[in-house]
Amino acid sequence: QVQLVESGGALVQPGESLRLSCAASGSIFRIYEMGWYRRAPGKQRELVATMPTGGTTKYADSVKGRFTISRDNAKNTVYLQMNSLKPEDTAVYYCNAQSVGGNYWGQGTQVTVSS
């Protein structure tokens, strides 16, 4: 089992930055990929960024150049740095961990970009 706890969501203005955190616990040694997904109002959940262990990060076209996914193995934490935020980035952001034992999700954290 893997537990994921997100934090960092907030209400921000367009153009501002925000950093989301996802703390993992449990059977983390079995994780082979972590990532961030989001669900905007009235839309399906979509990939934002993924980071395979030892692999190449992947970003949605809509966030390339603005968002950066990173990982601190010592803290078992994955981050999503979001710069130049736009109103269309408004969504609930979910942390995801894919492991040998299954696919796990956090509870989500709300990001609202509005003036």
Image (tube, helix red, strand yellow):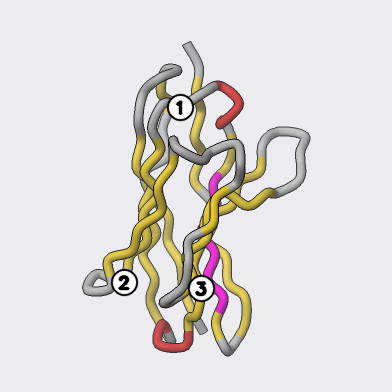
Amino acid residing under circle 3? Glu
Q: Does residue 92 sit above or below 114 in this rendering?
A: below
Q: Does the magenta stretch include residue 94?
A: yes
Tell whether label 1 touches label 2 (CB within 8 Å): no
Nearest to the eye among marks 2 and 3: give it: 3
Other residues around mark 1 within 10 Å, as few (<14) / some (14–19) / many (≥20): many
Q: Up-down: is 41 above or below 7? A: above
Q: Name the residue under label 1.
A: 85
Q: Is mark 1 on a helix, strand or loop?
A: loop
State which region is magenta: 93-98
Assess whether mark 3 and mark 2 are in contact (beta carbons under 8 angstroms).
Answer: no
Instruction: Provide residue 66's location: percent of width, then percent of height.
Output: 44, 35
Q: Name the residue under label 2.
A: 76
Q: What element carries label 3?
A: strand
The part of the image, by quadrant, that contains residue 53 is bottom left
Image position, residue 75 (x, y; %):
24, 69
Could you tell me the amino acid type at mark 1?
A: Leu
Lower position in the chain sequence, tag 1 or tag 3: 3
Label 2 – label 3 distance at C-alpha: 13 Å
Instruction: Please give the name of the residue rendered at 62% of the width and 82% of the height, measured from the top-left corner.
Output: 102
Which residue was labeled with disc 3?
Answer: 33
Q: Which of marks 2 and 3 is nearer the N terminus?
A: 3
Drawn side of residue 107 relative to residue 75, left or right = right
Dominant secondary structure of the residues highlighted in magenta in the image: strand
Residue at 36% over, 35% down: 18
